[in-house]
Amino acid sequence: MVIVLSGFFEYDIIIVGGGAAGLSAAIYSARYGMKTAIIEEKVTGGLSSTSPLIENYPGFKAISGMDLMDKMREHAETAGAKIIEITKIVDITIEKKYRIKCTSENEEQYYCKACILAMGTKHRKLNVLGEEKLAGRGVSYCSTCDGPFFKNKKVAVVGGSNNACLSARYLNENLEAVVNLVHRRRELRGEEFLKEAVKSNPNIKKYWDSVIQEIKGQDSVQSIVIRNVKTNELQEIPVDGVFINIGEIPQNELAKKLGLKLDDEGYILVNRRQETSKDGIYAAGDITGGFLQISVGVGEGATAAVNAFLYIQGGWYSESKI
């Protein structure tokens, strides 16, 4: 039974974060008979929903991130999980064993016996002149979200990761945009298939060994200034949009408040059961670092949920974890 009294809510397991790991955890938790809630600051899907094309998730030869996350959300709800969106958890307190309080920024209190942290990561910024000023006015971190506004226009894609390659291909092949790829190294990173697809595409112009020095524009993006890191030569390129894909950083504010052990990059340390350094607190997905892939997050979410269930039942549980 879920108790609701003046902003007071009670569940067995609460999952903070509604990306792939959180949705997977919710499916398993609910199917184990746990009263389960996902609390998501924005809407479910996380960064996975921003991927224009996913070609390495088992069972789907090709699917958009948004479609895949929609299917996961539907699955979680069908299993019986409660999904609470547009609700930011700002504090988590362990009051005693099997009594954890999650407080929202609206001062609503959500209690649970075990909590799974799946906040994921957020986009890393360039931190260059013009980026903040023109955010939402040509500067974007999501080609799926904002790409259609730049159909047949000139854009820059920054980065050399899988996501950068996917963005470049999507903007050029699907939206017929003129793409300028800017990468600080000579070689792209990630899957060989994606790298070759970008390198062999004559409609994607590559600027190797280069970084963006400045994003120019008044009311919207008009050009970028790039600098060759080897020669220091500057070059201005006219573009209508800039898509930044230079990696992610962990959303670890709650973990820090809880006093969880983190690695040198700020990711939550967990063991094979997805247990953190605090009893009753689990973590799954990109927030734990490592190989940041949807399939990994789904596996970690399932592992966290099963072990949270066992912890609540007084079963498989270790006092000393991390």
Image: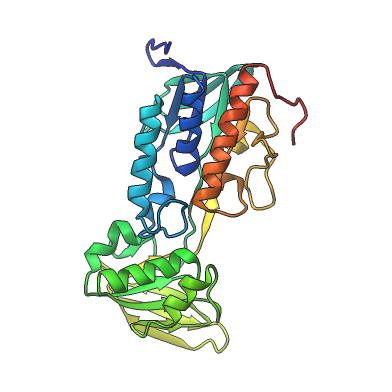
| Left or right, residue 301 beside residue 277 | left
Residue under the point 46% across and 71% down: 194
Which quadrant would the N terminus be assigned to in this image?
top left
x and y, in percent, of residue 248 in the image: 52, 56
Q: Quadrant of residue 169?
A: bottom left
Residue 251 appearing in the image? no
Q: Is residue 168 positioned above or below 272 on the image?
A: below
Instruction: Give the residue at the far right of this rendering.
Output: 320
- Foreground residue, 108 or 11? 11
- Foreground residue, 119 or 21? 21
| Left or right, residue 133 beside residue 55 | left
Which quadrant would the C terminus be assigned to in this image?
top right
Looking at the rendered structure, the number of numbered marks drawn on it comes to: 0
Residue 36 appearing in the image? yes
x and y, in percent, of residue 252 in the image: 57, 42
Residue under the point 42% across and 83% down: 200
Q: Quadrant of residue 135?
A: bottom left
